[in-house]
Image (cartoon, helix red, strand yellow):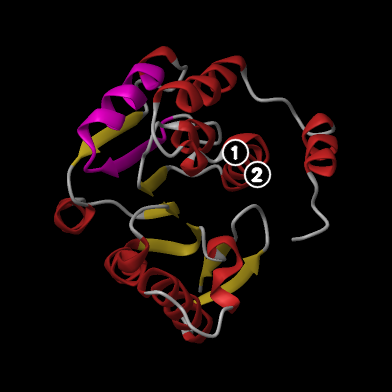
């Protein structure tokens, strides 16, 4: 939103729970060493994901799209005592980067990082999900949603990132990726299996509660 200046964002961050030191380092190193660091969730969104996970206390969390592992580590903060988080990404290079930080975290035994195409991996996973975070290739958001929705527990939470796509969803003439995101947003809003809120947090989060 236009009124969210850097100064106002800094104000929000300064008056929110701080990033854990490991995540602060991961944030910094992602910006220094990895391409497209804008893909990282960052302080405010990361604390929001952690907050939601702590409210839900999930036994099983699924993340589609790992990048450098920041969001996985945030979501893992709310896992129940014997909980497990599975994160899937096809990029071997960023997965190696993410795995280093997962191994250094308090959640190294609770997080499983799978290298592969989620469309191939998901049908083989036999879990009932309490929380799902989708942050991968945008054109396949509807595919991922359809693959997992029946495996989400009633009352489970699904979250899709980047659903405002830098505001381009409002453009009359949309490129293919923007149109795919817009179509996904409309699909979710019409799906009676979920109750949904599109929240203008960072680049847009679609929050879905499984009915």
State yes or no: residue 74 in magenta: no
**Structural distance between the alpha carbons of marks 2 and 1:** 5 Å
Q: Is residue 24 left or right of residue 72?
A: right
* Percent coordinates x, y for residue 138 in the rendering: 37, 63
Task: Name the residue beneath numbered marker 1.
Answer: 46
* Percent coordinates x, y for residue 178 in the rendering: 44, 71
* Percent coordinates x, y for residue 19 in the rendering: 65, 25
**Relative to 171, is 21 above or below?**
above
State yes or no: residue 87 in magenta: yes
Q: Nearer the viewer, residue 82 or 144?
A: 144
- The span shown in magenta is 82-102
Q: Label 1 neighbourhood size at 10 Å, few (<14), some (14-19), many (20+)?
A: some
**Relative to 16, is 158 above or below?**
below
Q: Residue at x 39, y 34 (%)?
A: 35
Q: What secondary structure is found at the residue carrying circle 2?
A: helix
Q: Residue at x 43, y 42 (%)?
A: 59
Figure quadrant of residue 140? bottom left
Q: What secondary structure is found at the residue carrying circle 1?
A: helix
**Relative to 122, is 146 above or below?**
below
Instruction: Locate the N terminus by quadrant.
Output: bottom right
Q: Is residue 2 left or right of residue 163?
A: right
Q: Residue at x 42, y 77 (%)?
A: 179
* Percent coordinates x, y for residue 38 in the rendering: 51, 41
Residues at discs 2 and 1 in contact (Cβ within 8 Å)? yes
Q: Nearer the viewer, residue 70 or 79?
A: 70
Q: Is residue 139 left or right of residue 58?
A: left
**Relative to 105, is 74 above or below?**
below
Q: Residue at x 44, y 36 (%)?
A: 72
* Residue 48's disc number: 2
């Amino acid at each position: 939103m236009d009124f969210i200046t850097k100064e106002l964002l800094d104000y929000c961050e300064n008056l929110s729970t701080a990033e854990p030191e490991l995540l602060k380092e991961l944030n910094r190193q992602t910006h220094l060493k990895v391409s497209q660091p804008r893909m990282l969730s960052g302080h405010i969104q990361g604390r929001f994901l952690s907050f939601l996970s702590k409210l839900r206390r999930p036994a099983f969390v699924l993340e589609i799209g790992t990048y450098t592992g920041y969001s996985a580590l945030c979501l893992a903060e709310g896992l129940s005592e014997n909980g497990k988080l599975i994160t899937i990404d096809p990029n071997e290079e960023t997965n190696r980067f993410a795995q280093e930080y997962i191994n250094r975290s308090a959640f190294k035994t609770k997080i499983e990082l799978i290298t592969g195409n989620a469309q191939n991996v998901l049908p083989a996973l036999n879990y009932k999900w309490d929380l799902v975070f989708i942050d991968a290739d945008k054109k396949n958001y509807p595919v991922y949603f359809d693959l997992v929705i029946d495996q989400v527990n009633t009352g489970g939470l699904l979250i899709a990132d980047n659903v405002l796509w830098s505001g381009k969803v409002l453009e009359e003439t949309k490129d293919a990726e923007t149109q795919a995101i817009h179509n996904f947003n409309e699909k979710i809003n019409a799906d009676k299996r979920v109750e949904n809120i599109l929240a203008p947090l960072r680049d847009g989060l679609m929050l879905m509660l499984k009915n």
